[in-house]
Amino acid sequence: MADQRTTPTAGAERPTPAAKAAAAGNGSAEDPREKMLTTQLKKVRYRADALIEVLHAVQDIYGFLDPVQLLRVATELQLPPSRVLGVATFYHLFTFEPKGEHTCTVCTGTACFVKGADELIAAVERELGVPEGQTREDGVLSLLQARCVGACGLAPVALVDGVVVGKATSDMLLTALDKAGVGPMADGGAS
Amino acid sequence: MSTPDLFDIAQKEAEAQGAFISTVLCCGSTACLTSGGQAARDAVDEVVASNGLERDVRVVSTGCMGLCSRGPLVKVRRRGEDEVLYADVDGAAAREIAERHVVGGEAVEHGQLSLDHPFFARQVRVVLEHLGEHDPNRIEDYILRGGYKALERAVLEMTPEAVVDEVLKSGLRGRGGGGYPAGNKWSLLAKAPGDDKSVIANGDEGDPGAYMDRTVMEDDPHRVLEGLALCAYATGATRGFIYVRAEYPVAVRRLEQAIRQAKRNKVLGKSIFGTDFAFDVEIRIGAGAFVCGEETALMASIMGGRGTPVLRPPYPTERGLWGNPSLIQNVETLANVPTILNRGAEWFASIGTERSRGTKVFALAGKLENTGLIEVPMGITLREIVEDIGGGVAGGRPFKAAQTGGPSGGCIPAKHLDTSMDYESLQALGSIMGSGGLIVMDDEVKMPEVARFFMQFCMDESCGKCLPCRAGTHELHELLKKVCAGEGTLLDLDRLETLCEVVRDNSLCGLGQTAPNPVLSTLHYFREEYEALVAGAAVPQASAQPGVNAQDGSA
Ligand SMILES: Cc1cc2nc3c(=O)[nH]c(=O)nc-3n(C[C@H](O)[C@H](O)[C@H](O)COP(=O)(O)O)c2cc1C
Ligand code: SF4
Ligand code: FES
Ligand code: FES
């Protein structure tokens, strides 16, 4: 989680689903995502104390906290940009980089830790060449951690694109990833 | 403004439900859905539809039935017959159950789970009483089971003081970890001046490996709302907040829906039950920061800021949200209140021990045969939980320790299995009741690794405001890493202990103050494992079974 607490950087040019969807409208005045954010801002009536809700909305809509959008949020909620950035960097769920096309999230809560979550992470790192907390160079896969997804009875647990794999073994997880269309990196090289 | 007629709603609901010949209850909570619960539900629906039995068979997706490790669970109830509970119900099994039992009237023999099973028989359900029984999406189902009756009686027949008194008399203590008497907090807020007071339900559930509060919010959201409304009535608060961690989107959706239903039925909002008591509830969502479970950080987060704790006093009941008196209570604490008012403080106080009244919900996890969500009377022994309810350690391996209180707690070794699960006894052993995470470890688990795991968590989650916690958790983690890697010395163990005391005694908030607990506790009970590591040897096995060949020590 803390690993997601990276510093803001300009969005990389990886093709995230959100970016793809908006590819047509990107740059033009008609970006549909802008409207979506306006709707969310209206919903909270532009209240400054709804900053966290608004940041969630930005991340839902854009896939990550785009610096341009953070400035917009600051203007619309009448907050200093430093305050917006301060809050955005405090919370672990906010990310400043687009995620990969697919995500694999391994639960590292206590129940899953006790039942070998570490091995799941190691297997994905080793077999698919993506370091924990990061996105693979080709932008296909992000490997993340979660603290308890509430299915401790099925520990260890991992999620592939949000779908839960319970009582997971390394093989099960890799198979699920393979089914989702995530293979080893094309050139075969791990970083 | 018209007043809601609970009796009428309940009666209509009872009639509607009574018209069905059978009811099929499918667990629709996280763990069961994860293991194929939707396929089971779909199969039942299909069979019912293809037999044209929609008017005879009611199919309900319920909250967590408890025994999550045996999910998906499905219960079949036919008029005039004993109910049957089935475990491990995949799509095919669900089809067979629907065809043979629901339609054909003959129970399927395999996959049945006896309701006399100690997992169920040893529990006492107060907070979880509706889970696995009702449809969490419908306020009518809650009202049918006596929901909002306590609130009705309170606002129509009781003074706020009388409500506070009842909670005081019940002996209810905070279920979020601290165990502070709820009634005391309520009377403090009641006495605080001001007409813009707030009550806050803490649904941040930071313990990484626990899902009690999540389940209560998702599977009985109206109970949380009613508890919060009762708290507001008793204390004179007009605003309510439920702070839910962002990782729980289903809980957020269910609570939002419940608020809409409650307002529509006039048990929330303006002029509740036709009186001039007005109370509104808002949901606030976290963004992944454990420290936001701490009261002052939580309030900062509700106000849209960084969740950085500040020194107390002043306590929230003096200076809380936007400077006004506020009160923070854990979700489970509040969920007890409707039942306390319905059944009386004496009844509630008769459960549990002298100083720990009532029940406690635990998320029972780790290396046990049966894992899931349980609710037990306080004062039950750890042995009863592990051996009877949990069915013993999985695979017949020896029990090594149980961890309560997550990263703020400690471990309880085998020699204390007969400890009574109450606030004071657990504290005496160097652990805490905590919010309800209960993780059982067998001989394969290495305790220094567990300590390192929790320290890493605290290090990652430290807000960085004060040095002892920010630098101390980092330093402790480095030391633990070194020890676990077999590169430490005896001197490092002394350093660990000294540094633990420094961090504990000098940190500003509970996170730093309790972060050393897992280290101190494992050092206390399992020092030989640490010593073996610094001597470069493998971790010694639990003494119980010398024959068992567990994994080797250092990695
Ligand atoms: C670092 C830290 C994290 C906490 N996390 C939680 C939490 O997730 N849920 C909770 O109810 N209380 C949590 N608490 C305790 C709360 O600060 C507070 O005492 C509690 O919500 C009060 O409610 P109660 O008296 O009903 O337990 C936490 C405390 C600290 C110091
Ligand atoms: S003890 Fe830790 S979490 Fe608490 S205020 Fe200090 S640095 Fe922040
Ligand atoms: S600890 Fe992994 S699901 Fe709870
Ligand atoms: S989720 Fe179904 S029994 Fe717990």
Image (cartoon, coloured by chain):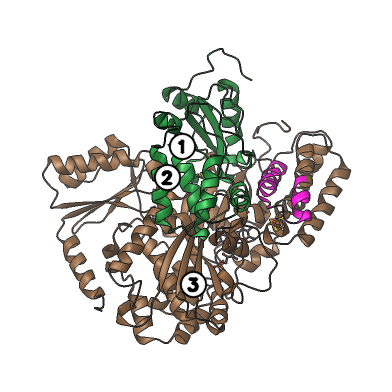
Quadrant location of the C terminus of chain A in the rendered image: top right
Please give left or right for residue B120 compared with residue A116 in the image: left
Can you tell me whether the CB of the residue at mark 1 lies under 8 Å from the nearest atom of ligand 3? no
B255 up-or-down from B73: above or below: below
Q: Does residue B434 show up?
A: no
Quadrant location of the N terminus of chain A in the rendered image: top right
Residue B31 is tagged as 2
Task: Identify the chain of the residue marked 3, using the numbered disc in the image.
Answer: B
**Helix, strand or loop under label 1:** loop
Dots 2 and 1: beta carbons under 8 Å? yes
Which one is nearer the viewer's eye here, A168 or B251?
B251
**Helix, strand or loop under label 2:** helix
Q: Is residue B471 part of the magenta span, yes or no?
A: yes
Can you tell me whether the CB of the residue at mark 2 lies under 8 Å from the nearest atom of ligand 4? yes
Dots 2 and 3: beta carbons under 8 Å? no
**Marks 2 and 1 belong to one chain:** no
Which one is nearer the viewer's eye here, A28 or B550?
A28
Dots 1 and 3: beta carbons under 8 Å? no
Q: Which residue is mark 3?
A: B351
The amino acid type of the residue labelled 1 equals Gly
**Helix, strand or loop under label 3:** loop
Chain given the colour brown: B
Extent of the magenta region = B447-474
Please give left or right for residue B471 compared with residue B371 in the image: right
Instruction: Give the mark, 2 or 3, whose residue is nearer the N terminus.
Output: 2
Residue A166 is tagged as 1
Mark 3 nearby-residue class (10 Å; few <14, some 14–19, many ≥20):
some
Residue at 38% x, 53% y is B253
Residue B281 in picture, x, y percent from top left: 42, 67
Can you tell me whether the CB of the residue at mark 3 lies under 8 Å from the nearest atom of ligand 1? no
